Image: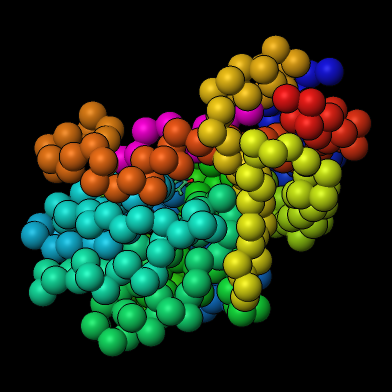
Amino acid sequence: MKTADRLDRGFLLYQKEFEEKALEVLRSGWYVLGKEVQAFEEEFARHLGAQFCVGLASGLDALYLGMRALGISTGDEVIVQANTYIASVMGITMNGAVPVFVEPNVYHNIDVTKIEEKITPRTRAILVVHLYGQAAKMDDVMALAQKYGLYVVEDCAQSHDACFGGQKTGTFGDVGCFSFYPTKNLGAFGDGGAIVTNRAELAEHIQCLRNYGSRTKYHFDEVGVNSRLDELQAGLLRVKLRHLEELTARRLEVAEYYSAHIQNECVEKPAVQPGSTSVWHQYVIRCRDRDRLQAYLKEKEISTMIHYPIPPHLSRAYQHLHILEGSLPITEEYAQTVLSLPVYSGITEEEMRYVVEAINRF
Ligand SMILES: *Cc1c(COP(=O)(O)O)cnc(C)c1O
């Protein structure tokens, strides 16, 4: 049996609704920054319990523009977990700021107990990544940020609807940065992103920045960017948002099935910390013999992924930071041992059983 790595199952689940919306937008004659974007922004903000949402072209832009709107720039330091997707780090360095890496805890989120030792007079913000869909320990993060007067930026690209203490990720910090890349839990049919915030002046500034720094047509207040969410993606995201709860519930079922049935001494299953929920963007196991396990599963046509094989500090893109191999041992060990099992939309019971049986026989 071949597990799918295509995304059309997510489309087929609600095909009629997507097709109707797509035709409606195509026939509307209005394609960028219109009523679909505005409606999506209102609905997504309300859905999360945030006051404002600004639609953008990608998750990377959300990180870049969110930090830019906070005034983070050259010479500033931003604390971030070392085991994240590289886009989190690029959002920092695109603003001229320096990433200061902190090791993760056993939940693959930032180890809050290791933040304080990294704070310097130049530290401006803590960038929290709710990695793999699990909310980070936000009470401790917010308390530290308050103590030192730091901004909090949340990377929610993988955590749509994940909660800490019953509150949704993206609503704790100054800005919550979302991606709607097709594989994300709330995925579009192309690129998309958004920022949510409770601060009106930040929302207004980000609206200006996404449209060339313009507030009034042909009047430019600063050098902005073109980072607009288009009408087609916004319309399709509105359809998907209506189904997000059932899609998340299904991911939880898959994760619970894996956790209940995978029994193999060399496999460590993922844990969820007290107070947090996970929306299971990924179901990540750890295995000392990871590469052999992945090859074995591939032979059985089970597609797995490694999130991520090279930590940002060892990536060629960040060689100029001169962070030596061995300096972030937990992060580096995770890069060698993590493996993401299939949890995509539309996975069948039969496929789940097949995955579990294969792993248990390894
Ligand atoms: C996907 C992702 C991003 C970037 O989002 P794009 O929309 O692809 O630019 C940023 N951070 C994390 C953790 C991600 O998973």
Q: Residue at x 55, y 65 (%)?
A: 135
Residue 310 colored in magenta in the image: yes
Instruction: Decide which of 41, 349 is in the foreground and name it.
Output: 349
Q: Which residues are magenta?
A: 304-312
Q: Is residue 287 above or below residue 219?
A: above
Q: How many marks?
A: 0
Q: Seen from this angle, which residue lies furthest right?
A: 350
Q: In the displayed structure, would residue 235 be above or below residue 183? A: below
Residue 301, image x and y in percent? Answer: 73, 16
- In the image, residue 248 sits, relative to residue 139, either above or below, namely above
x and y percent of residue 46 in the render?
62, 74
Q: Is residue 12 magenta?
A: no
| The C terminus, quarter of image | top right
Tell whether 133 sits left or right of 8.
left
Rendered location of residue 32, percent (x, y): 49, 47
For the residue pair 199 and 299, the one nearer the viewer reads as: 299
* Residue displayed at 84% across by 29% down: 357
Task: Specify the color scheme.
Answer: rainbow
Q: Is residue 289 above or below residue 55?
A: above
Q: Is residue 332 left or right of residue 149?
A: right
Image location of residue 98, percent across then percent down: 17, 54
Q: Residue at image x 29%, y 48%?
A: 328
